[in-house]
Amino acid sequence: MVDDDPLTDDAALTEMEHVEEALEMSRAARRRLEAERIEEGAPREGVAIFRPVEKAVLVALHLGAQSGHDVEASLDELELLVDTAGSRTVGRVIQRRDHPDVATFVGRGKVEQLKEHAHSLGADAAIFDDELSPAQQRNLEEKIGVKVLDRTIVILDIFAQHASSREGKAQVELAQLSYLLPRLRGWGVALSRQAGGRVAGGAGIGTRGPGETQLEVDRRKINRRITKLRHDLREFAKARRVKSQERERRDVPTVALVGYTNAGKSTLLNRITGADVYVADQLFATLDTTVRQLDLPDGRQVVATDTVGFVKKLPTQLVEAFKSTLEDTLRADLLLHVVDASHPEAEAQIVAVDRVLADIGADGLQRLLVLNKVDAADQDTVAGLQRQWADAVTVSAVTGEGAGVLLERVAQVLPPNRRVVEALVPYDRAELVAAAHREGEVLKEEHRPEGTYIVANLGPGAGTALAEYASSNPWAADSLR
């Protein structure tokens, strides 16, 4: 008989407590703990560069042209971003000014108030709702005595946690390093390996030479890594263009789902295509472009793509890094602009998405507004949105309400695709038969004395070329419309 070991029981109990604590943690927090972070070392290749934050005070600037509601709404979104990143908001500070202060963004007097407020709340960071310049970030961190971050760095950190594919990780890392490069000097000891370190209030004796040398080393490393990432992204873009060109060659229409982050694009894609794309009720849950086949009610098969969500004040570094991915949107035949109709800022989010689409040159593409989450939305709000956007379609990606109507509208809006063409092609026009094989689906082919008899399912490109020898032109009615 073996005696029970109380130490073993205690250890097992402790282990169970750790497991329970881990299960209670948010997904973002678990991923943050699992991820490798840099605190006092210099940046390393391929590693997330941002320091973890537990409690943060949010800071916003209320400029003269803004309304108080807009400022609060923007801070509400920043709080959601901070929560998604795995941190907690403990306070807010709003400063009214006509324009940002060049040195400290909010002004010298407000900096002192912010310092007292942050320390009284036990905050370890102040997060600003706008992108700070490297000098502003450095000055504020010195004066406040806590980490100073901005909206851009929070969004980049979320992207770093959620990126899963090789291309997505490369895009996020490129955006991170592009943000970091001009801020190397401002990050102080977090990026310094010089012997003397940085002296508060100014550079100490003997610190300039080695520090400058190390900064140059870091810059060279980051520049080399940026060059490598851009090369990799060009290769990814080439592979994606080949697939896109193959679809275009076969005249397969493309429908791209765009919209604000957390509008329900991935859930809607799953609903209408039967896909199993990862979904979560959080910001930027999906970063990687997903391509799925979509069957329309008229029998046509099209390609549906789910793209990265947009947000107000989307960092320019991300737009640049994800440019090749966003360019897929430019090649779409139809954009499904998915809107969270239950969100109190739905109208503002529509405007924000329109602005991003204009920035990437997609504002002229055919578009269909989709009011999603109507099962959770106030019906008066939905009715108001429908009055403003009369052509909008209302759906619930969760319950399936309106999904059939949406597919019918997509079939109506998309330009005519393939049609069956029956033709007798002279032998001296063999290139037309070759084009039919290359660009469509040949259903029947016979070699007759007068030429090649062919029945093919073709798009308007190859199909109209065969019209001269066809028994009838299936696109003739379109030209009369």
Image (cartoon, rainbow, N blue to C red):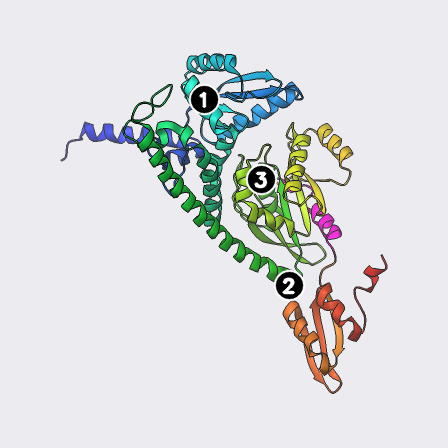
Q: Quadrant of the N terminus?
A: top left
Q: Residue at x 70, y 74 (%)?
A: 432
Q: Earlier in the sequence, mark 3 or mark 1?
A: 1
Q: Which residue is mark 2?
A: 249
**Mark 3–mark 2 distance (CA, rounded to whole Å):** 28 Å
Magenta span main SS: helix
Three-letter code, disc 1: Asn
Q: Is residue 157 above or below residue 441?
A: above
**Mark 1–mark 2 distance (CA, rounded to whole Å):** 56 Å
Q: Foreground mark, 1 or 2?
A: 1
For residue 47, what is the image quadrant? Answer: top left
The residue segment tinted magenta is 399-415
Badge 2, how many Cα within 10 Å: few under 14, some, many 20+?
Answer: some
Look at the numbered discs 1 and 2 and tell me whether their residues touch, using CB distance below 8 Å: no
Label 2 SS: helix
Badge 3, how many Cα within 10 Å: few under 14, some, many 20+?
Answer: many
Query: From the viewer's perspective, is 55 left or right of 452?
Result: left
Q: Which residue is mark 1?
A: 139
Label 1 SS: helix
Q: Position of residue 80 (x, y in %)?
A: 53, 28
**Outermost right residue:** 480
Q: Residue at x 45, y 16 (%)?
A: 118
Foreground residue, 296 or 131? 131
Q: Which residue is mark 3?
A: 309
Q: Position of residue 283 (x, y in %)?
A: 54, 35
Three-letter code, disc 3: Gly
